[in-house]
Image (cartoon, rainbow, N blue to C red):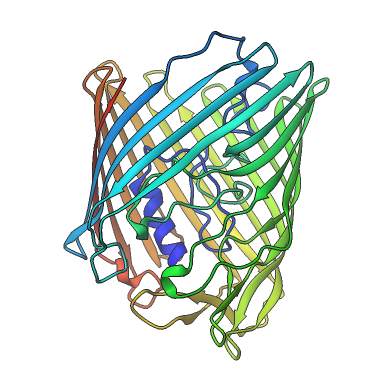
Amino acid sequence: MNTAIVTLLGVGLLASSLSIASNHDMTDDLLLDDDMDFLAADAFEVVFAAEKPPSLLRTLGFSVQETLGWSKNNAALFTHQTTANAKWAGGLSPSWYLEWDASAAAQWPVTPLMATSETSTASEFNINTLYVQYSVGPISAKVGHYSIGWGELEGAGVLDIINPAPDLTQGNPSAGDNGQWLASGRFYGDQWELSGFYTIDPELTDMSAAGFPAPTIEDPEWGLRLGTQISGSDVSLYVGQFVEDTPILDLMTTSTAANSYALVGIAANKAVGNWLFKTDIAKKSGLSLYSNAAPTLTKSFDRVDYGVGVEYNATSGQQYGATVYGRQWRDMDGVSGALALSMIAPPAITPAMDMEAGAMLRFSDSYLNDDLSFTLMSTGDLSGAMVMLSTAWGYRVNDQWSGELNLTTAKANADSMYAAFDGEVLAVFSVKWQY
């Protein structure tokens, strides 16, 4: 479906700049995430600022960024945005910490991906981060708008599923606003920790462009994580209830519904010298698929997601990574599939395979005293339906000025749901000033 295509391209397009965000749709799980040792850093929350010593109020950070994105297939800009960002973080007391990050953006006329008409000038205001955190002894609590990440693997979406993906079809390649309103807490024990979260206001993929209203979410999202060490390896157990990011569409009534599912999973990592080995496994029960015979009806299915990854950090500074992941649908009925939406064609049912698998390779390095950065990544479906190659070059002129160029190209089979992106080349250039 659209979100699968957009996210797959978005992974490469934003390979060097996407913060770890998560996504839990059954098809658009390709988002990057940073693996972290839970005893050394915070694997459950992107920032665990209360672990830092209390400090005086920090100065206000401010930046302005100009972003241009060009599509070869459209032969036009698919994004042109001017963004002003302000942020502040600091300790209010030995126990209280506050952080906020907000941006205002002007979106200039462009032709979005998978669209044929040009948009008009628009503006938006985003609260990227806004939370307060309280810590005392082994207990901490946090509430506000922020991102969290589960699991160890980058780009597989096995456990890293909490937050929705950025929507590149709307011409905004930024994942800075990829958070949700959450309440979370953590308790540190002796060589173990228990953390949990509750989503105050779950967010779903916006289907308004296709004429579908936002659904009413009846079931809450929540999750628990228990982490410990076993034989020198970090091991975490997960359980939770989530809402699929892509709403269920009723083509007859043009209505939408939110589908919730249960998750049980395990993740582990093991460091051996400069090598880091990682794995995620999760069973997801109650996922939805469409019936070819009745597209407005859905059935409940179970799926096992799994993946393994390895990273190598060379002494010279280069970083290498590889991830292989798969999804095994249980008890498929032979007539169910995924509903693929298109902005220029009627929705269509695409066959759902019992088994899906993908892989991602990544290399990164820096030069000129880290002022010049380089990232190269390849990702795609192991069936060969789509393969994507992306590269990102970033250069820091000084403390105020920096720039980045992202190039992404894709190769897709003509009979696949990614056919529209065969031969596509996306180029995104940004210039940023900050103080």
Q: Nearer the viewer, residue 430 or 55?
A: 55
Residue at 56 percent of width and 73 percent of height:
353
Q: Nearer the viewer, residue 372 or 317?
A: 372
Whether residue 315 is situated above or below residue 255 in the rendered picture: above
Q: Which image quarter: residue 263?
A: bottom right
Whether residue 298 is situated above or below residue 92 in the rendered picture: below
Could you tell me residue 413's position as x and y percent? 34, 71
- Residue 235 can be seen, yes or no: yes
Determine whether, in the image, residue 411 is placed left or right of residue 183: left
Q: Nearer the viewer, residue 106 or 197?
A: 106
Q: Which image quarter: residue 170?
A: bottom left
Could you tell me residue 104's position as x and y percent? 37, 40
Residue at 38 percent of width and 38 percent of height:
17
Determine whether, in the image, residue 247 is placed left or right of residue 367: right
Residue at 30 percent of width and 63 percent of height:
113
Q: Nearer the viewer, residue 46 or 81?
A: 81
Whether residue 123 is situated above or below residue 57 in the rendered picture: below
Q: Which image quarter: residue 46?
A: top right
Quadrant containing the C terminus is: top left
| Label tally | 0
Could you tell me residue 346's position as x and y percent? 41, 83
Whether residue 207 is situated above or below residue 44 in the rendered picture: below
